[in-house]
Image (cartoon, rainbow, N blue to C red):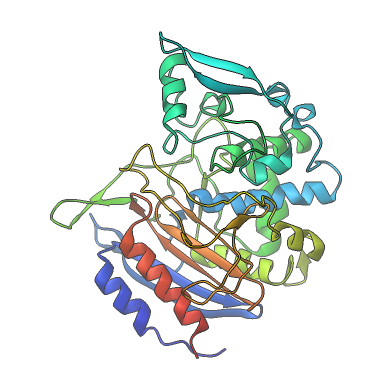
Amino acid sequence: MRMIDHTPFEQAFASANLPGIVGMIVDRDGLRFAQALGQADASTGAAMAQDTPCQIASMTKALVSVAAMQLVEAGRLSLDAPLGAVLPELADPQVLTGFDAAGQPQLRAATRPLTLRHLLTHTSGFGYFFLHTEVLQYFAAVGAPAPGSLDSLRMPLMFDPGERWEYSVATDWVGLAVEAVTGERLGAYMTREVFAPIGMTHTGFSAALPDGAAKVHSRLPDGTFKVETSFLGGGEYDAGGGGLVGTAPDYARFVQMMLRGGEIAGNRLLQAGTVAEMARNQVAPLRAGAMGTAMPALAQPYDTFPDQHTGWGLGFLINPEQGPNGRAPGSLAWAGIFNSYYWIDPSSGVGGVFMSQLAPFGDAGALACFGALERMAYSG
């Protein structure tokens, strides 16, 4: 294993004012770099370790996408058949056209059925309450659902399927589709068919934040940290859009599996052709990946490559041009709302995982640390 100088990562952390971070770099053969810095809990001083459990939030989506594609390979799910046959609630999607004078939502029937491909590519028409003001307005009119409830997913579409790219609750519905065709909880299926074969022994859906897990923090005006009670799991269903708790070493195993075309340690999760299809831009000519915000205290506006016409595969952002920190065109990436990030570069055979637990999303210090990690992977 070629040794990588830790200094740039440590310097970036020293400048970032983050509570605690973990960075890992892998290639197809294994681990190339790993370091934990800072604190998992600023209120107790507990140190961040390489294997400290973290809420991986929307980094859950890539793993659930793999589970769905396993079932596509098995012929139990279809990418392009109407999904209403599997999830009757999605059989007659309605599009929100606006609100009347009394503030009540106005709806019409969608012009085409929803498919699994729409969900995996975030072209379904669904939205997110923290990104889209129209979703907030809809729930204000019909009644705010309980966090973690199935009702929180029951919303009209903002546009006809396939017409736009908007980040959304779509992958939560993917998880429900997995449950519908397997007859078991999403977590049970994924533990057996995804996590165990990869060796992800410390990743799963939890009813509460596990003992020893890193706490979510926010910054106070004086630069110190407040520990938050934020927890994305423990709801009415296993949240395929963001409910997993896991560790950086576990997620690094997933990155390595994708770099290896669907296989690791002699266990094949997906066929190489399926991995290649997941890595293909599915949404052209649409541009994907840019997000606004309806709740800046939770998530800042975000656009990884504002100067590129980024695409989206079956679960991943795709950069069509060389990235500023080294990743090759056609790399895969995404993030979790508590400022965790990853990338997978099949062309160069390298990828990385960065974990922190800080709100709001899009923190400049966290992104600087992630950028340093990426540059280290391509140095020398």
Residue 83 in picture, x, y percent from top left: 75, 32
Please state which of residues 228 and 337 is positioned toward the viewer in this rendering: 337
Name of the residue lying farthest toward the top: 102
102 on left or right of 182: left
Q: Quadrant of residue 103?
A: top left
- The answer to which image quadrant residue 256 occupies is bottom right
Q: How many marks?
A: 0
Which residue ends up furthest to the left in the rendered image?
222
Report the side of 257 relative to 156 (left or right): right
Question: How far across and down, in percent of the image, does residue 213 sit?
Answer: 40, 54
Residue 269 seen by the camera: no
Residue at image coords 61%, 43%: 122
In the rendered structure, the answer to whether residue 95 lies left or right of residue 183 reads left
Q: Is residue 193 left or right of residue 19?
A: right
Q: Quadrant of residue 346?
A: bottom right
| On screen, residue 108 above or below 8 | above
Q: Which residue corresponds to the image point at 64% horizontal and 64% vertical from the top-left?
A: 199
Residue furthest right in the image: 75
Quadrant in which the N terminus appears:
bottom right
Q: Which residue shows up at 59% across the image and 31% down it? A: 159
Residue at image location 53% in from the left, 15% down from the top: 106
Q: Depth check: 150 or 169 in front?
A: 169
Where residue 354 sits in the image (x, y, percent)?
A: 45, 66
**Quick check: 4 above or below 39?**
below
